[in-house]
Image: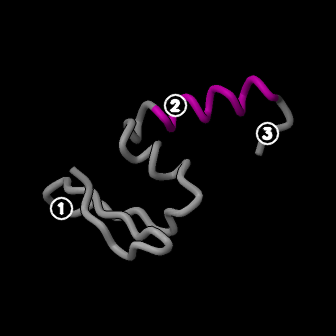
């Protein structure tokens, strides 16, 4: 990414804020290989070992 650590930190903070906690947590999970958001806003994850799962 950037050569400036502060720029990278701000970029990551902006993405965490924009994506929200549910997507941010899913992206941090090493078992999640795909994150899908349906038109109605429902979040579905494709997780290794579990397949596709709906979140609550």
Residue 13: image quadrant is top right
Name the element at disc 2: helix
- In the rendered image, residue 6 lying in the magenta stretch gets the answer yes
Q: Rounded to the nearest whole Å, what is the CA distance between mark 3 and mark 1? A: 33 Å
Is tag 3's residue or tag 2's residue first in the polypeptide sequence?
A: 3
Q: Is residue 23 above or below residue 3?
A: below
| Residue at 22% across, 63% down | 38
Name the element at disc 3: loop
**Mark linked to residue 24:** none
Q: Rounded to the nearest whole Å, what is the CA distance between mark 3 and mark 2? A: 15 Å
| Residue at 52% across, 31% down | 14
Instruction: Give the labeled residue for mark 3.
Output: 2
**Figure quadrant of the N terminus:** top right
Q: Is residue 51 above or below residue 17?
A: below
The image position of residue 33, as x and y in percent, is 51, 68
**Mark linked to residue 39:** 1
- From the viewer's side, name the closer residue of 45 and 6: 45
What is the span of residues highlighted in magenta in the rendered image? 5-16
- From the viewer's side, name the closer residue of 9 and 29: 29
Q: Is residue 32 above or below residue 12?
A: below
Q: Looking at the image, do the residues carrying marks 2 and 1 touch, with CB atoms under 8 Å apart? A: no
Instruction: Give the labeled residue for mark 2.
Output: 14
Which residue occupies the extreme left position in the image? 40
| Residue at 43% across, 30% down | 17
The image position of residue 37, as x and y in percent, is 29, 60
Q: Is 54 positioned to the left or the right of 32 in the image?
A: left
The image position of residue 18, as x and y in percent, is 41, 36
Local crowd size for mark 3, using a 10 Å CA cut-off: few (<14), some (14–19), many (≥20): few
Is tag 3's residue or tag 1's residue first in the polypeptide sequence?
A: 3
For the stretch drawn in magenta, what is the main secondary structure?
helix
Name the element at disc 1: loop
Q: Rounded to the nearest whole Å, what is the CA distance between mark 2 and mark 1? A: 23 Å
């Amino acid at each position: 990414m950037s050569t400036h650590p502060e720029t990278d930190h701000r970029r990551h903070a902006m993405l965490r804020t924009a994506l929200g906690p549910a997507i941010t947590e899913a992206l941090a999970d090493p078992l999640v290989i795909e994150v899908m958001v349906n038109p109605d806003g429902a979040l579905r994850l494709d997780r290794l070992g579990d397949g596709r799962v709906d979140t609550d």
